[in-house]
């Protein structure tokens, strides 16, 4: 196929990924790499470069709205970014020394984890229990804006565990060129027990910063091909914007089931191709 | 600190950054497609990118010469700076609050981001 045809098809595919990602809350970045490698036969390294750029686009694009609403816990995000950024630099550095086949299998594991997380009932269990001692010392506890215009206080639990999960999330992000959103939310709302909206907003902030840490390394390694990255970035961005508009009217539960099935199929196909030595 | 004003500024920085990046990417992408649209794609094998597309210096120079792929890569660089700007503005906000510990944390994260972007590792 010619460059023009491929660009158009990749933009359309990325639009669909961004749209579904926004409608389901799973993020579109995770299906970009499988789409590019399995459907368009793009080399895994170029695919990771293009996906990483699109992750930054959606994070910053959604960030403007999140900032205005005031849910983001900036202290917590900054503190945990020490972990994600160091993890991402290490992961992006290591990526060059790991064969694409192994990365593809790791990618399949991340896809299956995201699918598993999305099927579990959404557990929002913020707490007013005594915070972890580090949370008080680092002043990580915060307040969540309420619809009435007030603020509802919450405390932060298990800071060391959250920090550890974030290092892993950062390393995976740097290795595979994704945002590691599912793992970040796991650390924030399951381990550290933040309210759901606070953890979504804080994770969105962190995803962009983490991806920016690896992006420079990806560019210098030649993983980011602009001809491939621009239709992905524009497509995902437009898809996410339209998705945010349609959110209220869309049958999100069915879409979520559909998207989860797609993710599982992609994971199986990634492993199958890796076994056949096609990466 | 006028928290809402800083949040407003931050929101605008993100919006403008993403908007400018997308617009520049479209310009660069159109030039690229105009020149190479009928060529065949070669993404199946990994062979890096043409020289100059892999460094900040090379990208800026190629973009100033009006080359499509370099302009697009510049757009991606602009995009990468949006989260970095977010960290820098957070440092300013903490400095205004007199919160030295968090200024230090922000500056550490910022320096690691610049190491990633400008070299040293990789």
Image (cartoon, rainbow, N blue to C red):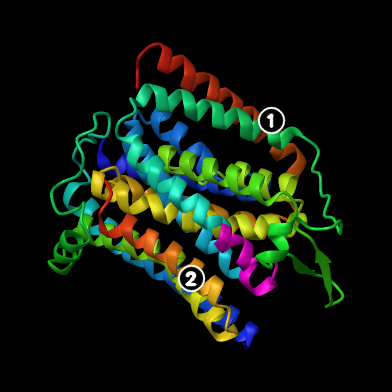
Q: Is residue A148 left or right of residue A68?
A: right
Q: Nearest the camera: B38 or A112? A: A112
Q: Nearest the camera: A183 or A89? A: A89
Q: Kindly indicate the quadrant of the structure image that contains residue A199.
A: bottom right
Look at the picture and state if B48 lies above or below A124.
above
Indicate which disc residue B104 carries: 2
Q: Residue at x 25, y 55 (%)?
A: B119
Chain for numbered disc 2: B
Chain for numbered disc 1: A
The residue pinned by badge 1 equals: A116
Look at the picture and state if A187 lies above or below A134.
above
Residue B104 appears at what percent x and percent y? 48, 70
Q: Residue at x 68, y 65 (%)?
A: A137
Residues rendered magenta in the picture: A66-79
**Neighbourhood count class around disc 2 (C-alpha, 10 Å): few under 14, some 14–19, many 20 upward:** some
Mark 2: which secondary structure? helix
Quadrant the N terminus of chain A occupies: top left
**Neighbourhood count class around disc 1 (C-alpha, 10 Å): few under 14, some 14–19, many 20 upward:** few
Q: Is residue B2 left or right of residue A128?
A: left
Q: Is residue A140 left or right of residue B27?
A: right
């Amino acid at each position: 196929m010619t460059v023009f045809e491929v660009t158009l098809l990749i933009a359309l595919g990325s639009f669909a990924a961004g749209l579904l990602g926004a409608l389901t809350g799973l993020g579109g970045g995770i299906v970009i790499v499988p789409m590019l490698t399995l459907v368009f036969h793009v080399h895994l390294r170029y695919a990771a470069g293009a996906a990483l750029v699109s992750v930054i686009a959606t994070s910053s694009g959604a960030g403007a709205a999140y900032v205005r609403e005031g849910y983001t816990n900036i202290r917590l995000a900054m503190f945990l970014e020490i972990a994600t950024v160091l993890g991402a630099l290490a992961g992006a550095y290591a990526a060059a020394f790991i064969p694409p086949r192994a990365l593809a299998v790791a990618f399949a594991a991340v896809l299956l984890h995201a699918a598993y997380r999305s099927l579990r009932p959404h557990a929002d269990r913020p707490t007013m229990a005594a915070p972890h001692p580090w949370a008080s010392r680092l002043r990580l506890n915060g307040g969540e804006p309420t619809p009435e215009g007030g603020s509802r206080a919450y405390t932060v639990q298990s800071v060391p565990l959250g920090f550890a999960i974030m290092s892993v999330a950062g390393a995976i992000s740097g290795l595979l060129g994704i945002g590691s959103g599912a793992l970040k939310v796991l650390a924030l709302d399951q381990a550290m027990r933040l309210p759901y909206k606070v953890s979504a907003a804080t994770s969105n902030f962190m995803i962009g910063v983490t991806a920016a840490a690896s992006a420079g390394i990806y560019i210098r390694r030649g993983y980011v091909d602009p001809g491939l990255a621009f239709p992905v970035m524009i497509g995902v961005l437009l898809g996410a914007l339209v998705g945010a508009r349609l959110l209220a009217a869309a049958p999100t539960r069915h879409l979520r089931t559909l998207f989860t099935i797609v993710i599982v199929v992609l994971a199986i196909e990634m492993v199958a191709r890796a076994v056949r030595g096609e990466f | 600190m006028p928290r809402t004003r800083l949040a407003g500024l931050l929101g605008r920085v993100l919006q403008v950054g993403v908007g400018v990046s997308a617009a520049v990417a479209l310009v660069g992408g159109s030039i690229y497609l105009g020149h190479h649209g009928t060529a065949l794609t070669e993404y199946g094998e990994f062979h890096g990118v043409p020289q100059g597309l892999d460094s900040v210096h090379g990208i800026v120079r190629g973009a100033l010469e009006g080359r499509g792929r370099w302009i697009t890569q510049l757009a991606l660089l602009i995009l990468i700076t949006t989260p970095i700007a977010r960290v820098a503005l957070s440092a300013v906000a903490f400095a205004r609050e007199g919160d030295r510990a968090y200024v230090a944390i922000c500056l550490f994260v910022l320096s690691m981001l610049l190491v990633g972007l400008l070299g040293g590792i990789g």
